[in-house]
Amino acid sequence: MPDTRENITQLLVDLGQGDERAVDQLLPLVYNELRRMAHHFMVKERSEHTLNTTALVHEAYLKLIDQREVTWQNRSHFFAIASIAMRRILVNYAKMRSREKRGGGGTPISLGEVPELQIIAEERAEELIALDEALDQLAEINERAGRVVECRFFGGLSIEETAEALGVSPMTVKRDWRFAKAWLKREIGES
C-alpha cells in the first residue's frame, strides 16, 4: 500500500487532470499539515488580534485546488505553493486593514462580509505589508532566497521540507535563509 506522500502526489496528479473526486480525497491527507503551517504563522500574532487559523487553512486550500495552471509535481511542491497562498491571503488582508485604517477611499468592507477573517492589529498589518514589499525586492535579487522565506516564514516548513519543495540541498536552503534574513532585516530596518 502506498504511503501518504505517494497518495498525496497521486491525488495532485489526478486533480491536475480534472478528477474532481481527488479534491475530497486530498483534504483529509493535507489538512493537518496545512493547519500546522497556518498555526506556525499565526502563533506570531498577538492572541487577541489574529486571523482565524482554520479560516486561513480553508481559504488557502480553496485557492490551491482551484489552480488550473499548476502542474503539481509532488507533496512538497503543493506545500510550497500553499505557503505562497497563505502569504498572499495574509498580505491582502493586511492591506485591506491598512486601507480601512486610513479611510480607504474605496467602499468599506465590513468584517461581516469577510466572516472567515478576524481583525489583525493595525501595527502588525503594517509590518506584514513592509515584509511583503521587502520580500518582493529580495525576489528580484535572489528569487530562490525569496521562495525560502515564503516556505520557512509563511509556510512554517523545516529546512529539509523547504529543500525538498525547492529541489535544492538543505545546505543551500540554510545559506539562502541566512542571506534572506540578513537582507530583510537591513531592508526593513532602513524603511
Image (spheres, grey):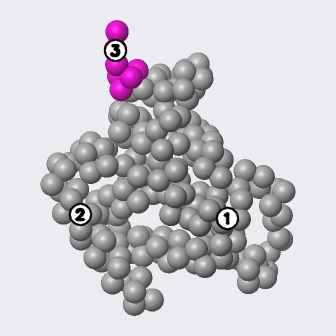
In the image: residue 118, left or right of residue 180: right
Q: Are marks 3 and 2 in contact (CB under 8 Å)?
A: no
Residue 189: numbered disc: none
Residue highlighted by disc 3: 2
Q: Which residue is mark 2?
A: 176
Q: Which residues are magenta?
A: 1-7
Label 1 to label 2, Cα distance in Å? Answer: 33 Å
In this view of the protein, which residue sits in the foreground, 122 or 49? 49
In the image, residue 4 lies in the stretch drawn in magenta: yes
- Choose top left, top right, bottom left or bottom right for residue 7: top left
* Residue 30 is a magenta residue: no
Q: Quadrant of residue 122?
A: bottom right
In percent of width and height, residue 124 lies at 58, 74
- For the point 28% across and 59% down, which residue is it? 144
Say above or below: 135 vs 50. below
Q: Residue tagged by mark 1?
A: 48
Q: Amino acid at mark 3?
A: Pro
